[in-house]
Image (spheres, rainbow, N blue to C red):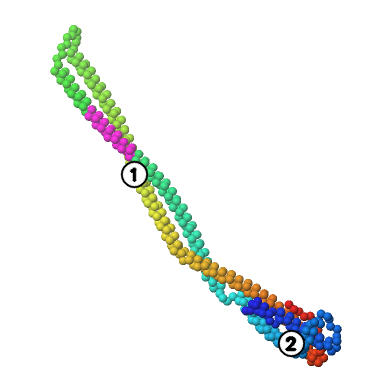
Amino acid sequence: MPSRNTAASMFGGAGGRGSRASVASLEGLRNVLRNDTERDSAPVVPAVAAPTAAAAAPAAPADDKQTMRGLNDRLSGYLDRVKQLQEENRDLQKQIDDILAKRKAPEGRNWDEVQKPLDDLKKKIKDITMDNAKLLLQIDNTKLANDDFKTKLDDETKARKELERDLDDLKKVIKDTKLNREQTQKEIDLVKEEVTRLEREHKDEVDALREKIKDSEVKVEIDSQNSNLAEVLNDIRAQYDKLAQKNLKETDDWYKTKFDTIKVEEAQNVEALQSGKTELKDLLKQKQTLEIQIQSALSTIRNLEETLRSTKAEYGHRLAPLNQVILDLESELKEVRSQVEQQVETNKNLLCVKMKLEAEINNYQQLIYGMTADTDSLEFDLEDALHNGKLWLKTKNKKKVCT
């Protein structure tokens, strides 16, 4: 690909300063021929051109041929150079067209084939994300259920503690009832022993009184002539019998009342004991039921925690290669982006080069157009110039262009 040095070499070769040098040679040739013509026909020559004509006066025909030969050589070299530059420009245009065609339809890489696995991976990632969302929802539901179970467990634990406290209170009540029963039984035994002892003492006293009455001799002196001892004794015996029956009845009533009270208390204690036993059985059943429910809740919690751990581990293993694939794709995407950016930068540089080349080509075309205009505008009649010393210059409507 030619660079700006080529244009500089062109300006340094056939165009630019070379063209101006050739023009200067034409001016010298024109002055020489003009001096020869002055010697023959004596035309009016400006004063400024006189020293130049005087300096170039000797050897005019040889210099004219040499100058024309040099001009022809320069013109042929310049035309060859123009052809070479046109060929190079065609090659450059072909390269630019190829670059533009590649830019329009890139064949370096099939992005559809690259995009297809990316779309599949995006779909898989989306599905896995949905699965993760579902799992997170299940985990949240499991956590909520776990919290509910923990709340129920706390409530059941509190109820169990309250039941245990009630059981302890009932055990204390039962123990106190047993102690009261034992104490009451002891009191009953003591009362029975006391009754037995009193009955025995009463019997002994009655027997002793009867013996005394039987063995005693009573002497009664009654002044009354109508006194009757047997009747008096019967009255005394009747009084003692009444008194003994009265005491026995009072004792029997007291003991009967006492026994009735003890029986009522015993019945109440037995009833309370039976109700306590029934309530204790119910509480024990509730305790067993609560323990079974607590064990079931703990087992459910352990199973849910184990399921949660296994699910996290499984999806961690499943997501690890996908994460690696994502990282690889991201790195590849970065590389592709960098390549695309480099390609864009290269295309920009090529576009700049193309624009510069087009500008230089326009300059070359202008130079070529100007030089062809110069060559077309000047027609030399060398034979007339040599024989007659005259140079006919036929100028056309176009002017010389120098850049």
Cα separation, mark 2 vs mark 1, equals 143 Å
Residue 169, image x and y in percent? 35, 39
- Quadrant for the C terminus in the image: bottom right
Q: What secondary structure is marked by label 1? A: helix
Determine which of the numbered discs, if any, sits on residue 281 in the image: 1
Name the residue nearer the viewer: 179 or 119. Answer: 119
- Quadrant for the N terminus in the image: bottom right
Instruction: Give the residue drawn at x 75%, y 78%.
Output: 402
Residue 302, image x and y in percent? 40, 55
Name the residue nearer the viewer: 330 or 147. Answer: 330
Instruction: Give the residue drawn at x 24%, y 31%.
Output: 189
Q: Is residue 30 visible?
A: no
Q: Vertical placement of 303 versus 371: above or below? A: above
Residue 185 location, quadrant: top left
Q: Label 1 is placed on what type of residue?
A: Lys
Q: Which residue is mark 2?
A: 67
Instruction: Give the residue drawn at x 71%, y 85%.
Output: 74
Residue 346 location, quadrant: bottom right
Q: Label 2 is placed on what type of residue?
A: Thr
Point out the stretch of residues depicted in magenta. Answer: 170-194
Front: mark 2 or 1: 2
Residue 61, image x and y in percent? 77, 90
Q: Vertical placement of 347 versus 218: above or below? A: below
Q: Is residue 401 visible?
A: yes
Q: Vertical placement of 254 versus 40: above or below? A: above
Magenta span contains residue 76: no
Q: How many marks?
A: 2
Q: Is residue 173 left or right of residue 392?
A: left
Name the residue nearer the viewer: 370 or 95. Answer: 370
Residue 347, image x and y in percent? 62, 73
Q: What secondary structure is marked by label 2? A: helix
